């Protein structure tokens, strides 16, 4: 475990403040859920909770199905990282942090089809693997935007359209409803 050199006291209500630098580094925002664990050494471990992570098996199966049907790379992400990936770039995408613009797209609850020539085009990851077209649909659960399903194309001459957006939207709707159950 990495030492930060920061010491905090617990207040009379049992609360502790997570320093701003740590929150920024780990992308923890106000209202984000955290899981609390303890280990045998008496350490308390806080971990960001990803509701979509709970559905990683469903998410992976859905990404695999879309990828096979369309022969396109497909990812399912929460607001921080890629939870499931399928297609040619599966290994390089799985577990990668998403780009800040993708996080904003999710927060704004946008569904979009774009090519790399469009100003709306958003790289999925921070270390941008080169894709030229995308169809992205936001996953909404109990009114909260919690992630996205994104279909990607690495062919410069290809253009995704309404069918791909509808497929991403169906997947996003399904995963959102699974979270509600």
Image (cartoon, rainbow, N blue to C red):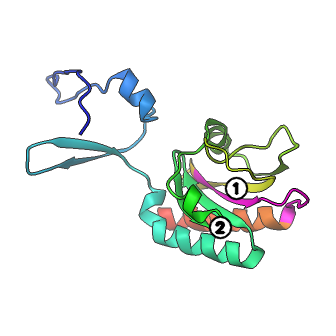
Q: Do the residues labelled 2 and 1 touch (CB within 8 Å)?
A: yes
Residue occupying image coordinates x 74% and y 78%: 69
Dot 1: element: strand
Q: x and y percent of residue 108 in the render? A: 67, 40
Q: Mark 1 points at which residue?
A: 137
Residue sitting nearer the eye, 138 or 3: 3
Q: x and y percent of residue 134 in the render? A: 77, 55
Dot 2: element: helix
Q: In the rendered picture of this protein, how many numbered marks are placed on residues? A: 2
Q: x and y percent of residue 120 in the render? A: 81, 40
As drawn, 127 above or below 176: above
The span picked out in magenta is: 147-162
Q: Name the residue under label 2.
A: 171
How many C-alpha atoms fall within 10 Å of the one at disc 2: few (<14), some, or many (≥20)? many
Q: Is residue 44 left or right of residue 47?
A: left
| Residue 181 can be seen, yes or no | no
Residue 160 forms part of the magenta stretch:
yes
| Residue 149 can be seen, yes or no | yes
Q: x and y percent of residue 112 in the render? A: 78, 51
Residue sitting nearer the eye, 56 or 41: 41
Residue 25 forms part of the magenta stretch:
no
How many C-alpha atoms fall within 10 Å of the one at disc 1: few (<14), some, or many (≥20)? many
As drawn, 61 above or below 73: below
Separation of residues labelled 2 and 1 (CA atoms)? 8 Å
Residue occupying image coordinates x 66% and y 64%: 74
Residue sitting nearer the eye, 127 or 178: 127
Residue occupying image coordinates x 46% and y 66%: 55
Quadrant in the rendering for residue 101: top right
């Amino acid at each position: 475990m990495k030492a930060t050199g920061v010491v905090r006291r617990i207040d009379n209500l049992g609360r502790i403040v997570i320093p701003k630098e740590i929150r920024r580094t780990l992308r923890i925002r106000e209202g984000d859920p955290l899981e609390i664990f303890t280990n045998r050494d008496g350490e308390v471990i806080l971990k960001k909770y990803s509701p979509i992570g709970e559905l990683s098996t469903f998410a992976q199966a859905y990404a695999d199905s879309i990828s096979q049907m369309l022969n396109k790379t497909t990812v399912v992400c929460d607001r921080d990282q890629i939870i499931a990936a399928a297609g040619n770039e599966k290994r390089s995408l799985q577990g990668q942090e998403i780009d800040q613009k993708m996080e904003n797209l999710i927060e704004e609850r946008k569904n979009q089809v774009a090519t790399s020539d469009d100003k709306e085009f958003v790289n999925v990851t921070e270390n941008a693997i080169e894709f030229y077209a995308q169809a992205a649909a936001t996953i909404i659960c109990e009114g909260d935007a919690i992630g996205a399903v994104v279909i990607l194309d690495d062919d410069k001459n290809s253009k995704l359209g309404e069918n791909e957006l509808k497929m991403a939207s169906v997947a996003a709707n399904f995963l959102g409803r699974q979270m509600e159950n």
